[in-house]
Amino acid sequence: MISQVGRELYKVPHRILDHRVFVNGEIDTFLDKFELKRNDSEVESLFQVTEIVGSLKYDLSERCITLGNQSLTELATAVNNLLNGVETLLQKAKVEREPSVELQEARRAREQRKAEFMNNLKHNYQRIDNSFEEKEEEIAELYSDLQLKLNISK
């Protein structure tokens, strides 16, 4: 008895949520109403509409293609003319001007300061190299003096 109740409880959600029977019945009644009561008039009108749309599709597609080609060529020429006008305007705007006297003097001053800085940098590098060489010589003399004093042979 308890097992039967358990089986029945297990089947309850399936029974409640299974709408296939209802949906199939609704589809059948819709088809009956559509086909029998209307005597297939909607089907015939649908076929007529599809034939009209098909014929319009081919006629209009050819017209659209020809009109599109004409319009596109006109647009292409208009765009090319516009691009040529823009190019000429840019060429006119590119006229090079001489820099002002103040700008030229500022450039010369910057170049002169740069040259002085580079000369000072080279001079400082040379001083560092000279002092390094002097220190190397001093250290070499000290080690040679130590070797002589300690009688160490190489």
Image (cartoon, rainbow, N blue to C red):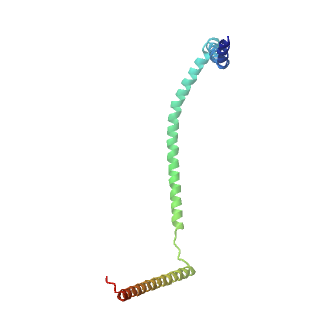
Relative to 32, say whether 69 is above or below. below
Q: Where is residue 11 drawn, in percent x and y?
A: 65, 16
Residue in the image at 51% along x and 65% along y: 91
Is residue 21 shown left or right of residue 141? right
Is residue 151 shown left or right of residue 40? left
Residue in the image at 51% along x and 45% along y: 72
Q: Quadrant of residue 31?
A: top right
Q: Where is residue 5 drawn, in percent x and y?
A: 68, 13
Is residue 109 shown left or right of residue 125? right
Relative to 15, say whether 112 is above or below. below
Q: How many marks?
A: 0
Relative to 113, say whether 1 is above or below. above
Q: Identify which residue, 36 or 115, lies in the foreground.
A: 115
Q: Identify which residue, 101 or 115, lies in the foreground.
A: 115
Q: Residue furthest front?
A: 150
Relative to 94, say whether 129 is above or below. below
Residue in the image at 49% along x and 42% along y: 69
Q: Where is residue 109 drawn, in percent x and y?
A: 53, 83
Q: Quadrant of residue 102?
A: bottom right
Q: Quadrant of the C terminus?
A: bottom left
Q: Quadrant of residue 38?
A: top right
Q: Quadrant of the N terminus?
A: top right
Residue in the image at 53% along x and 33% along y: 60
Q: Where is residue 131 drawn, in percent x and y?
A: 44, 86
